[in-house]
Image (cartoon, grey):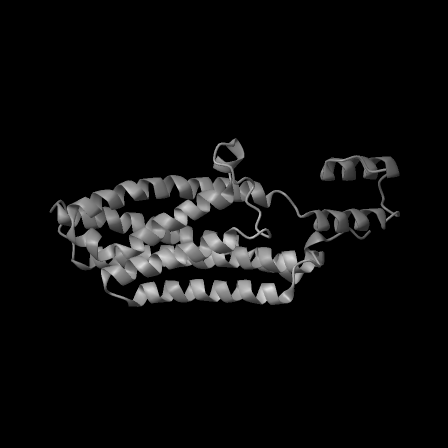
Amino acid sequence: MLSPSPAAAMTPIEWFSLLHPVLMILFVYPVVGATIRLGILARERRLEINPLPASVGVEHADHGRWVGSGAVVAVLIALIHSFLSGTSLSSAVSFPRLALLLLVCAGTFASLLALWRVRLAALRASFALLTWAGLLALGSQPEVWRQADNPFSGAFWSSHYWSGMLLMGLLLFSMAAGPEIIASLRFRRLHVSANLLVAVLLAVQAITGSRDLLGLPLSRQGSVQGQLSAAPSLSRPASLSRASASARFGAPIS
């Protein structure tokens, strides 16, 4: 007896969509844990609670930059997937427009790379804002699902997109203000306060991202339904097969 294999029917674009959660789970979140631990050790060294080498603070800053950069790359992957899906599903999306969007993605990534290289405070702030503005501009496109754009609606505050964009702004701020955080007590307090919110947003991202992953695309549901209906020689009675398929897809099958 042959059973339908949804994974075998996945398209290359659907496989590409998995890169976003895989990068977040396997890279960003583990590095976040290491960054928090190094931040605690850096504070203990500054307060002379624990005699630690000076490299602890440097490693904390380096890990923080990798967290921000990994998150930016993951968001760009998710946005590119939305654009590629919109192009493949809608004839109204032109390929020249897709090329322009991909060019903006490349420019946003270039701004992130420049943020790593520049030293002047004004340039760091400028490239951080350019990177965040690029993400916001790309995310405002109609191909990107945002759940809600009205901040007075409940759906807005449970949106994976908007909490992610706020998270990106805070991470980019920490990347841009690294030298000021080291030199100024006021900036360190602001950094700690902002990263308490970052911790909350990371939890929100994990919850809303898992929630959104539970919803299969309609095209995938249709393909699996077609495979079920194309296999009449199942060992179970037809009534049981129809009932189980109906329960799987959440709608009666006629």
Image quadrant holding the C terminus, namely top right
Residue 97 position within the rendered picture, expressed as x and y whole percent measured from the top left? 59, 63
**Side of 126 where 251 appears, left or right:** right
Residue 250 position within the rendered picture, expressed as x and y whole percent measured from the top left? 72, 36
Look at 76% across and 35% down and name the residue there: 251
Residue 68 quadrant = bottom left
**Side of 189 where 224 appears, left or right:** right
Residue 30 position within the rendered picture, expressed as x and y whole percent measured from the top left? 39, 52
| Residue 27 appears in the rendering | no
Between 153 and 19, the one lying in front of the other is 153
Residue 147 position within the rendered picture, expressed as x and y whole percent measured from the top left? 56, 41
Give the total number of marks visible in the rendering: 0
Look at 15% across and 53% down and name the residue there: 183
**Side of 125 where 144 appears, left or right:** right
| Residue 178 appears in the rendering | yes
Look at 60% across and 52% down and name the residue there: 143
**Side of 175 where 165 appears, left or right:** right
Does 41 appear above or below 12? above
Between 133 and 72, the one lying in front of the other is 133
Between 12 and 81, the one lying in front of the other is 81
Does 189 appear above or below 89? above
Look at 76% across and 51% down and name the residue there: 223
